[in-house]
Image (spheres, rainbow, N blue to C red):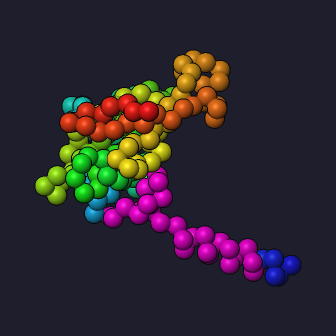
Amino acid sequence: MKKGWSLFVLLFFLISCTHNNNKSLQGNYVEPKIKRQIMDIASTYITDKFKTSDKSVDKGEILNIVNGQIKYVIDPSKIAVGLIDSDSVEDATITIPSYNGQYIVTTELLVLIKSDNKFKITKVLEGDMKVIKISDRIIYVEIPKLAPDSPNYNCAICREVVKFKYKDGDLLKTD
């Protein structure tokens, strides 16, 4: 019994020591400085939509911005980094869902291109989407095949992956 308990405690410490808050949704390491820049840009983007809003930070550095009934959730784990435009500097995306109560209203995908050592929002897409990865200058996004009022709306096989390529300031759907 003591061996089992000791093994459990050891496993707990191993898991807690390997946790890294600076990982993106792709599992890539995101420098704290870059993460902070992207979080600040996303926060400014959301707060600029309102005259007044309340901010709070949850555990895991998740930022909640509330205006009346609408709550925007800016989660640093939803940052994806990679090469998006034609230069050799890593760019980023961040997905920001908004909620009315417990129900999701919409999701905004901010595409941030880095130039002159600063990230700038170059494109915003709205809709139910989740960035899977950025690879070979392609942004892989998972979207639902069914309408939100469908009973099978969020089922695993009812979603598809769409690829976007950044070109001349726009995102173009590719095959």
Q: Is residue 77 left or right of residue 37?
A: right
Residue 146 vertical placement versus 32 (above, below): above
In the image, what residue occupies the spot 22% across and 53% down? 87
- Out of 3 and 35, give the one closest to the viewer: 35
Percent across and percent down for residue 32 are: 33, 64
Quarter occupied by residue 49: top left
Q: Quadrant of the N terminus?
A: bottom right
Q: Quadrant of the C terminus?
A: top left
In the image, what residue occupies the spot 29% across and 56% down? 90
Which residue is the extreme one toward the right?
1
- Out of 107 and 102, give the one closest to the viewer: 107
Numbered range of the magenta stretch: 6-32
Quarter occupied by residue 150: top right
Percent across and percent down for residue 28 are: 43, 60
Residue 6 vertical placement versus 96 (above, below): below
Residue 161 vertical placement versus 29 (above, below): above
Percent across and percent down for residue 125 are: 34, 31
Q: Is residue 57 visible?
A: no
Quarter occupied by residue 31: bottom left
Q: Is residue 116 visible?
A: yes
- Out of 146 and 55, give the one closest to the viewer: 146
- Out of 18 and 86, give the one closest to the viewer: 86
What is the total number of numbered labels drawn onto the structure image? Answer: 0
